[in-house]
Amino acid sequence: MGQGKGDIIGGSVLSLLAVTILILSAAFPRSPQMGDPGTAFFPNLIAIVFLLCSVGLFVEGFRQNRASDGAPKKREQAEIVRLRLFFIGIIALYIIVMPFFGFLISTFFFLLVIIKLCNTPGWPIPVTIAIVTSVSIYFAFREILNVPLPEILL
Amino acid sequence: MWEHIAAAIPLVLAWNSLLLMLIGVVVGIIMGALPGMTATMTVAILVSFTYGMPPLNGMMLLLGIYASALYAGSIPAILIRIPGTPSSAAAVLDGYPICQRGEAGRGIGISTFSSFFGGVFGTFIALFLASWIAKFAIGFGSSEYFALAFFGLTIIANISEGYVIKGLIAGFLGMLLSQIGIDPIQGSPRFTFQNVNLVSGIAFIPVMIGLFGLSEGLAIIEKIHARDRLKQALSNIVPSWSDIKRMMSTIPGATFIGAFVGAAPGTGGDIASFVSYNERRRWAKDKSAYGKGSIDGLTAAETAKNAATAGALVPTLALGIPGDSVTAIMIGALMVHGLRPGPLFFESNPTLAYGIYVGFIVVYVMILVLGLLGARMWARVISAPANYLWPVIFVLCVVGSFAMRSSLFDVWSMFGAGILGYFLRRGKYPLAPMVLGIILGPICETNLRRSLILSAGSLDFLYMRPITLALMVLSLVSIILPLIRNRQTPVTADGPE
């Protein structure tokens, strides 16, 4: 996707966000204090300027899109997009399962999967790194820094 | 001032502080030397280690990481032409040609010496500047604070790397994020959607970890398995007497440029090093030597970069406005301890405030010693296996955001900020303005509303108070100048040039 098209989509999404903020702010209570513009004042102010900037981005994107007509567009390989989505999914899954499986087990498997996803050959070194790292981080945070990391619930 | 410095010295030189600084310097050099790992990211993912420490010790660790990561970014810049951190981009210009001549060790030595002198002298300038500004700012009322925060926000346009609209959008996005939670004046909830986790607002540190840690990893995911190899052995690392004499003609000017550019809120080592390099080149007798391995060019860039690091502490500690992204995280780390940098910080926490400057000098001494003694080892770090490092960084992002309040909600905040940061990077939105927006948004709102209440709704305070008026005029200039510059920039298919 070209930068121009990206800016058109970005400008549209951000304009929608600004309008949503304005609608939500309308329900905020008025201030009883004299002179105070109230709870909604600042979010409204930000949303209005934000909306103007987003429209500006939309227009800029439109201009760029027209200027780049006919120019070859850089496309990200589908394989890289899939890899990135997979990474995001694995990290989300790691955060979801951590409270159930505890920090140690979930971190060990998370590290192992990610290390293997990074084209690391063989198993002994990735497994050793996953064990040593998860135990070291657990020890550092739990025992030294007194952070109550999630324990196994199952 | 001197009595507070004298009181801070024994605390900074206590064994636990020194050990933390040493750990910070070693970790910072390793991370800074790895291409793609920035000082901001390193400080963001490791800030969680400081929550349980006394504030001074925590700051010593962060200062060690901050200064050394920025210093070490020049190691790959000189050796393999890839800056380890954005601030080291100027070091490539003359550092890499020095390496190409077969003098890689000499290049690293010059970089280390320049960094040391820039860091130490820059710290002295920053110390005097900060304590003077803090004294001046102590009488500030809410209208001055509003004008100051507003001025800080207008700097967004200047630091938007040529993408003014995108910089403004990132800044306002940060301000919008800061609006979630309880209204600071009236106490009513805003954008909380009846979620109890949102009542206290989105925590700043997890957002920073997501923006600068997770998003960076996601952005370079396909390159994680790649390694850069060093092809040259290092020798003659300690600069010769003639090199030192030559460097001394550049260091004073570069230090001043670095410290003052760094002291402008929102700037950083990258701008300072290029400004200093260009100024040195402008006044040079033989301009043709620049870009071909000039000692003066490398010295100018490296000295200014490290002086700017010290300069960034001026607005951070004296005014509570972050000098750059790293100092923004430091403000967040201090806030975890219930401390708020600003004009009163030097009055209420003098030992900590001055201790930070004393610590900075000690950190630079460590960088000089470790940088020269361990140069060969740091050079090997460039070839470190990123396929093992990045997974560990992902875990540290998760644990670091969880550790602040033992809250999984903070982890999800980090995750959300990481995805948002990834899309912002992809769309070429600068991230630094977002940080300014998150920090300065609430200061701006609270003080504007207080001023309006005090003046019964009148805007007289904007022009009746001289400092407020001066800051508002500066803000206007700060908004208009980049817009004019941007209009003169030709638009291409890939955005402004």
Image (cartoon, rainbow, N blue to C red):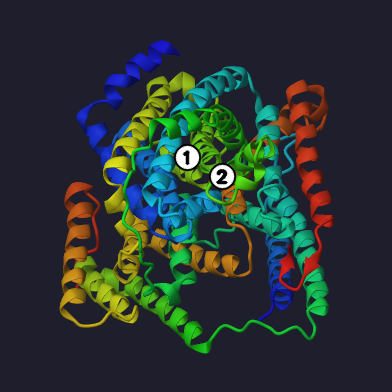
- Residue that mark 1 sits on: B331
Relative height, residue B142 to residue B35 (above, below): above
User: Helix, strand, or loop for circle 1?
Assistant: helix
Of B401 and B430, the residue lying toward us:
B430
Q: Which residue is at 82% across, 76% downward?
A: A67
| Residue A55 shows up from this direction | no
Examine the rendered structure and indicate whether residue B112 appears above or below residue B45.
above
Q: Position of residue B429 (x, y in %)?
A: 63, 62
Residue B398 on image: x %, y % = 35, 62
Question: Is residue A56 left or right of A105 when viewed as pictured?
Answer: right
Q: Indicate left or right for B256 with B32 as reference.
A: right
Q: Amino acid at mark 1?
A: Ile
What residue is at 51 percent from the left and 69 percent from the top? B419
First of labels 2, 1 by sequence position: 1
The answer for which chain carries disc 1 is B
The quadrant of the image that shows the N terminus of chain B is: top left
Q: Which residue is mark 2?
A: B439
User: Residue A4, located in which quarter of the rendered image?
Assistant: bottom right
Q: CA distance from mark 2 to mark 1?
A: 9 Å
At label 1, counting other C-alpha atoms closer than 10 Å, the crowd grade (few under 14, some 14-19, many 20 or more) is: many
